[in-house]
Every structure is written in C-alpha cells, then in structure tokens.
Image (cartoon, grey):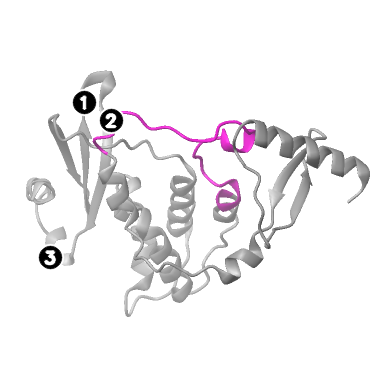
Amino acid sequence: MNPVKKEVLREQIEELLRQNVIEECESPYAAPVVLVPKPNGKVHLCVDYRKLNVVTEVDAYPLPRMNDLLNEATPTSFMSTIDLQSGYHQDGIEADQGKISAIQKIPVSTNVKEVQSLLQTCYWFRRYVPNFVDKVRPLSSLTKKKVQWHWGPEQQESFETLKMCLMTYPILKQADGSKPFTIRTDASNYALGAVLLQGSGPYEHVIEYASHLMIPAERNYSATEREDLAVV
C-alpha cells in the first residue's frame, strides 16, 4: 500500500475509533483491508473477511418465509435503518437495478419448457400483481397438453405485460388487524380476481391481490354465477 493510501487508511481508522465503531485489540488474527475508490474521488474502507468465513461454524437455521416476516411486521409503529453514517447505508430498501435489468432482458420463450420455467419463476409474485392469472393466461395455455405451440400477438402482449408488472413497484401495505378490511372481487370469462384493502377514500390501500384461473366447467357459468364464485 502506497504512502497516500496508508494515510487515508490511518485517518479512517482514527475516525472509526473516535466514533466507537471499532476498538483496539490484541489478537493473533487479522483481516486485510481494501480501499475501494468512489466516483467522487474518495475511498471506501472494506474488510476482507473471506478467511474468517471459511473457519466460521455455520449456524444452520431454517429461514422463515418472506410472507411470514412481512405479516409479522404488521403491528410495528416505527421502522428504521441503522448505521446511517455512511452513504451506502442511507439508500434504504429499493429494487435491485441489476435484477430489473435481468427482467428486461428475459428473452421470448421458444418452447413449452421455457414458458413453464418463466411462469414458475413469476408465480411467486402473484400476490403483488392484480389479476395475475388472467394476465398470464395466454402463456399458461401453451403449457397444456395437446395444445399446438403458437406464439402470437396475444402471447407477446401477455409476456410484455408480465415483465412490466414485475418491474413496477408494488404498492402494498401491511395489514392492521385493529381496522376493518374490504374485499373486492371480479370475474372475467377465464379468471377470478380479488383484492384485500384497508382504509377509505384517498387513504384506501391494497394489502394483497389474489386470482384464480377457472376450469372449463366454471367458464360455462353465467356472468352472475362467475361473480358469485369469485366471492367464494
């Protein structure tokens, strides 16, 4: 490390010591540091803990489901972030632009297996997309047996709509069990949809979306019967 970088490192370490972020210790072990350049000309102090990770005993623990964690956050009155001293901790939670770019670059499916893979990946996000199954119906119909492969304008529109929904920020809020809920349902010729809401007027917000693709027998119902089925 050249003298200039050493001086920068010394200044950053002294600042962290002054703020009680780190403390002096005597140990036979140490981890190397890396000074990563920032766009503004300054440097970001990083510590390489890869060797430590190798010898660290893994604490196996079943990861909780994301939906369960979100639901458990319902009674929270205040939510905050920690360690706001440095800029890279002040951005908050936002969509990973790299993943958004990956969605933009998803190629058009050329066979049934590719459509199945796409739908399986996207199905996890169905609660964030209104009328999800209706939007993907032209694609899911291609996965049925004895259906001849045909990618036409309807499939292309469904494909583009699905990608756009996945790239758009979902406006969902946590449910408040102490307040009343509102459920609205709807039915088309092929699918049923529902939305769970709270609040009223300009303060009304979505809690969750749900949708269901009707089987052939259900599609024969009258419009009124399909609307009733959506409620059920």
Determine crowd level at label 2: few under 14, some 14-19, many 20+ residues with C-alpha closer than 10 A: some
Q: Tell me the amino acid under the disc marked 1.
A: Gly
Q: In the rendered image of this protein, does residue 183 appear above or below residue 53?
A: above
Spot occupied by residue 63 in the image (x, y as percentages of width and height): 36, 61
Q: Of helix, strand and loop, which one carries label 1?
A: loop
| Residues at marks 2 and 1, CA–CA distance in whole angstroms | 6 Å
Between 173 and 112, which is closer to the camera in this rendering?
Answer: 173
Spot occupied by residue 159 in the image (x, y as percentages of width and height): 46, 56
Residue at 30% across, 51% down: 67
Query: Does residue 36 belong to the magenta stretch?
Result: no
Q: Tell me the amino acid under the disc marked 3.
A: Ala
The residue labelled by disc 2 is 205
The tag earlier along the polypeptide, 1 or 3, is: 1
Count the marks: how many? 3
Do we see residue 190 in this rendering?
no
Magenta residues span: 74-100
Spot occupied by residue 35 in the image (x, y as percentages of width and height): 78, 47
Q: Of helix, strand and loop, which one carries label 2?
A: strand
Between 45 and 226, which is closer to the camera in this rendering?
Answer: 45
Q: Outermost residue, front direction?
A: 26
Q: Which mark is drawn over residue 217? A: 3
The residue labelled by disc 1 is 199
Between 196 and 176, which is closer to the camera in this rendering?
Answer: 176
Residue at 9% across, 56% down: 221
Q: In the rendered image of this protein, does residue 88 appear above or below residue 149?
A: above
Q: Tell me the amino acid under the disc marked 2.
A: His
Determine crowd level at label 1: few under 14, some 14-19, many 20+ residues with C-alpha closer than 10 A: some
Position of 207 compared to 115: left or right?
A: left
